[in-house]
Image (cartoon, rainbow, N blue to C red):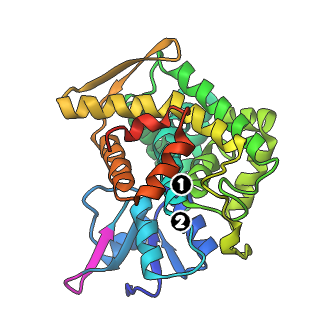
Amino acid sequence: MQITDDLVTLAGAVGSPYTRKMLAVLRYRRLPYRWITRAQVAAAGFPTPKVPLMPTLFRPGPDGGVEAVTDTSPLIRALEQRVPGREVIPADPALAWIDMLLEDYGDEWLTKAMFHYRWVYPADIERSTNMLPLWFDPNRPDDQIAQQGADFAARQIGRLGVVGSNPGTGPLIEASYKRFIGLLNAHLRTHRFLFGTRPASADFAAFGQLTQLAAFDPTPMALTLDLAPRVYAWTSIVEDLSGVEPDPADWISAVALPQTLRDLLIDIGRTYVPVMLANARAVAAGDQTVSLALEGATWTQRSFPYQAKCVAWLREAFAALGPDARKTVLTALNGTGCEALIEGA
């Protein structure tokens, strides 16, 4: 199997929100791609990435071999630098930073809801246990599928604490998800996407998680259908946006964010921001546990070094903005609680 820059080669899974995020970006950008299975990866002898995550993108390496890379956010930006046109990163630097913030919220906060609902509720556990192995290989014998599903479920349930889901935080996660879909539903009454009439990377981050929350796992899917039908419909639409014809004028202005988007930022400032900052402090101090007062309760979880890096990247990106763009971002975030992410940056 030949790896070239002209054909994006991606390995992932239907049940992976980050795989779905990346595939939707490739479809929207009309970039030729090949989606391969784990069996094809093994047969081709492709390398394993340093951190084995989905999706994995394979590209020509500097030594002439094949390089395996992960992490959708930098992959999206690398593809934009290499192939111009139909960009998902806004041209305005201030709006691009706000997009980066909302993309990280989708990737790092909404995933808590996805993991929580999937591996806490019996109906959701049963569906994932039965279906996820079949998505990898529907031709395996029933007994192998059953064993693989049971083993995978046990492993994932054991990892609930890694994403912060436990009896104390569960109600906070669920309340946050319900608020999110309500706020997005309100925004979609007047806007096709988060930042106007063309999609940004933040749209695809939210979409990736919603492919599971709104369109597969029974408990959050029922909630979404009941509380936010526009969100349910939008998730199906974003799967393939290759027919959208974007224009530079389709982005909203960072100096005049709609109230519906500010409402979402305010909610992000209530939950994602304090947890991410507390985690960053814990990682810096070498603490293994994060604990903070949140929404009248106590949030506790294991500290997570990667999410501390996410905070650092947001701060570095803000510091790299020009003075006017920094002022625009600060004005947009003023009073939302999100400004705490960049204090001192």
Q: Position of residue 164 (x, y in %)?
A: 42, 28
Q: Quadrant of the C terminus?
A: top left
Residue numbers of the magenta segment: 62-68
Q: Quadrant of the N terminus?
A: bottom left
Can residue 94 be seen from the camera position used here? yes
Residue situated in front as seen by the camera: 56 or 204: 204
Residue at screen point 27% across, 70% down: 47
Reply yes or no: does residue 269 show up in magenta.
no
Q: Image check: 179 left or right of 64? A: right
> In the rendering, which numbered label is found on residue 99?
1
Residue 324 vs 339, above or below: the answer is below
Classify residue 67 by image quadrant: bottom left
Mark 1 secondary-structure assignment: helix
Tally of numbered tags: 2
**What type is the residue that disc 1 sits on?**
Asp
Residue identified by numbered label 2: 89
**What type is the residue that disc 2 sits on?**
Ile
Q: Image check: 261 left or right of 305? A: right
Residue at screen point 46% across, 78% down: 8
Q: Position of residue 78 (x, y in %)?
A: 40, 72
Label 1 to label 2: alpha-carbon separation: 7 Å
Q: Residue furthest top?
A: 296
Classify residue 300 by image quadrant: top left
Q: How crowded is the residue under tag 1: few (<14 C-alpha within 10 Å), some, or many (20+)?
A: many
The first of marks 1 and 2 along the sequence is 2
Contact flag, marks 1 and 2 (Cβ < 8 Å): yes
Q: How crowded is the residue under tag 2: few (<14 C-alpha within 10 Å), some, or many (20+)?
A: some
